Image (tube, rainbow, N blue to C red):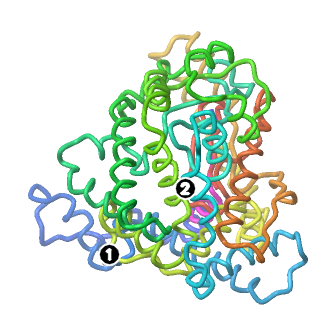
Amino acid sequence: MKRIFTLASVICMAACQHNAKTPAIDPANFDLSVAPNEDFYQYATGGWQARNPLKPEFSRYGSFDVLRENNEIRINELFAQMADMQAEPGSVEQKISDLYKMGLDSVRLNAEGAAPIAEGVRALLAVADRGELGRAIGGLHASVCNPFFGVGVEADLMNSDRNALYISQSGLLMGNRDYYLDEENASIREAYKTYLGRIFALAGLGEAEVAAAVEKTTAVETKLAEKMWSNVELRNIVAQYNPMSRADFERRYDAVDWASYREALGLGDFDRIIVATPSALDNANELLRTLPLDELRYYLAAHYIDAATSYLSDDFQQASFDLFGRTMAGQQEMRPRWKRAMAVPNGTLSEAVGEMYVARYFPAKDKERMLALVANLQTALGEHIAALDWMSDETKARAQEKLASFTVKIGYPDTWKDYSSLRIDPSKSYWENIVEANRWYTADNLSELGKPVDKAEWHMSPQTVNAYYNPTTNEICFP
């Protein structure tokens, strides 16, 4: 069992311990004018809601959102201080501050317009035959998005000490297949078509071509959605474990030139691949084989443009927000530019930012104190297991074995990720830098194929307000 606590959540826990007067239940959070049997939610939270009205940039607001907002202010203060410094070229400070400043520079972004994506869009719309599709898809998977399917490396579910290659369904810009198939989502589908029309037009397609591009993109995605596994089906982990030899895989899914795909993706040779959603990939393979080439080109271009919208001019960002923020999430306003700008280096160089965050807000003694607290909990749990009268001795032994192998990650990693080979060049566009960063992360992930699983690796940054359990490594992490 692996447990990870993010640093932000640990800071909260530590702070709560220092304040012994904090009540377990604050009566001010209740709304006593409402009977609990009439509206329990209003009864239990009405007071808190009245003191914390929903802000236009949020579609929901709770205690975790309060912590995240406080964290955003802290991180932005770190970045703002760095924005005026003359950082050494190639240093993490230079990479963080330049990414941050590029996100804030609305004048430059609006002046550039669609220029940063023009070449990429032209290349995708110029794919001449199906033989070129493998290279085009591999290039997108390496740096931008995951049309048709997604490929990545993670622990083998049947040998959790070793990393394996997985392939699974992907390729819907709205994410969930139900948006494309359920009648109740008809209005969202119309809003989606409006969005596609806007971004295709902003990217430079003519009016007549925009209409065709929208219809053909949605046609491809709807056909993909029809055979994708539902959220219920995806709960069946055993059904998603379908290892195949590379030869058998390429024989079954033969619509892609896999040699060109691997070269464009940067994936070396491999003997085995685990297919997570075989029937969905069968469908994607058939669509790649039979659909008209112009439909496939527009579909790929749509995914490319969509991936870039957050890093382009205001009109691209507004189009994206109107669909994904306003229509689908219920937000009334876009997040302030400083929050959007801050989120990019905070995600792209997450552990570098985390190292700065730790230095400012989380001394080593606090980490040691929280590790001791969790160790005490583990001891108590072991005593509890030993005293159970309903559990057999064999089961107790297995439970104690699992408890003893439980890995706890508190606050921040002992070894920080090395970003020295990641290049951020302010002379290039914001989007070009994002593409390069994505390529770096893809290469970093693929480099783990066939290697032992790094059980010390963190999958959440220290400044994240959350926690996770990783069953393949039996660890829990509390950043």
Quarter that holds the N terminus: top right
Which range of residues does the magenta coloring cover? 3-12
- Which corner quadrant of the image does residue 247 belong to? top right
Relative depth, front residue between 279 and 26? 279
**Dot label at residue 203:** none
- Confirm whether residue 438 shows in the render: yes
The residue depicted at 60 percent of the width and 41 percent of the height is 137
Q: Quadrant of residue 30?
A: bottom left
Q: In the picture shown, does residue 91 fall above or below 266?
A: below
Residue 364 versus residue 79 in the image, above or below: above
Image x and y of residue 179, in percent: 30, 47
What residue lies at 33% left-to-right and 40% top-to-bottom?
A: 222
Report the magenta stretch's main SS. Answer: helix
Question: Where residue 304 appears, x then y in whole percent?
Answer: 55, 55
State the mark number for residue 332.
1
Which image quadrant: the C terminus? Answer: bottom right
Task: Name the amino acid, label 1.
Answer: Gln
What residue is pinned by disc 2?
304
**Which label lies toward us, 1 or 2?**
2
Residue 320 shows in this picture: no
Please tell me whether residue 260 is drawn above or below residue 30 in the rendered image. Answer: above
- Where residue 113 sits, quadrant-wise, is bottom right
Is 7 within the magenta? yes
**Amino acid type shown at disc 2:** Tyr
Percent x, y of residue 147: 52, 43
Q: Earlier in the sequence, mark 1 or mark 2?
A: 2
Q: Is residue 241 above or below residue 317?
A: above
Asked which secondary structure carries label 2, the reply is helix
